[in-house]
Image (cartoon, rainbow, N blue to C red):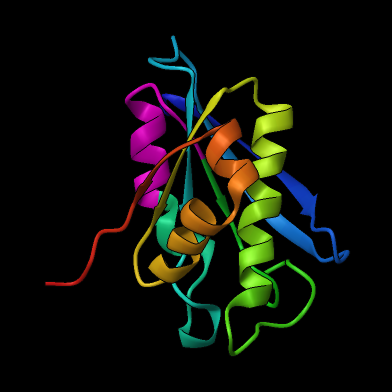
Amino acid sequence: MSKYTLESCTVETLDRVNLGTRFFKAKEEIKDNIVIVLVHPYPILGGCQALLKGIASGLAEKGYKAVTFDMRGVGRSTGRASFTGFAEFKDVIAVCNWVSRNLSSDKILLVSSSAACISESCSHRHQKMDETYLKGCLRPSYS
């Protein structure tokens, strides 16, 4: 039996792209008032939220809230992937804003792998995210 629930929703970006989003929530007590947003690898290279299901479900089973989403042009998300990453930057911002408004959390930890440039852009260039609720950015790399 699963120790977490899974909810699906759509998050709309400022440029009206709809992002397929999943929220993994522990059935038991939540350990911390933090939401971990997992960013999949670059869409053009085959990245999608399905790659993060194991990590997200593992976090939820340990009592954490986790969110995954498909960037524009991937899975059920509308729009088209970009070659520059600027459009995907908007996707990360939209999901973090949605988390802040809807999941009763005052802390967000942004985690990404090969899409690390997106997380870095969000954490270092978007002042509102820094000051309001973004508490950290983790970018594991390939070894």
Between 70 and 8, the one nearer to me in the picture: 70
Quadrant in the picture for the N terminus:
top left
User: 19 left or right of 44?
Assistant: right
Query: Residue at (64%, 20%) from the top-left corner?
Result: 104
Residue closest to the far bottom? 83
Instruction: Name the residue furthest right.
Output: 16
Report whether 42 appears left or right of 94.
left
Residue 81, percent across and down?
66, 82
Q: Quadrant of the C terminus?
A: bottom left
Residue 59, image quadrant: top left
Which residue sits at x=54%, y=79%? Answer: 43
Residue 39 seen in this snapshot: no
**Vertical order, 90 against 103 (above or below):** below
**Residue 58 found in image quarter:** top left
Residue 140 counted in the magenta span: no
Per the picture, the main secondary structure of the magenta-coloured stretch is: helix
Q: Mark yes or no: residue 127 visible.
A: yes
> In this orientation, which residue lies closer to the viewer: 77 or 129?
129
Residue 103's spot in the image, x, y percent? 65, 26
Residue 118: % across, % down: 50, 66
Query: Relative to 129, does residue 12 appear above or below in the rendering?
Result: below
- In percent of the image, x 53 and y 41: which residue is there? 130
Q: Quadrant of residue 62?
A: top left
- What are the residue bounds of the magenta stretch? 54-66
32 and 117: which one is in front?
Answer: 117
Seen at 54% across and 58% down, the residue is 125
Residue 23: image location, x then y, percent? 59, 38
Query: Is 63 colored magenta in this rendering?
Result: yes
Q: Residue furthest top?
A: 29
Q: Is residue 68 above or below residue 97?
A: below
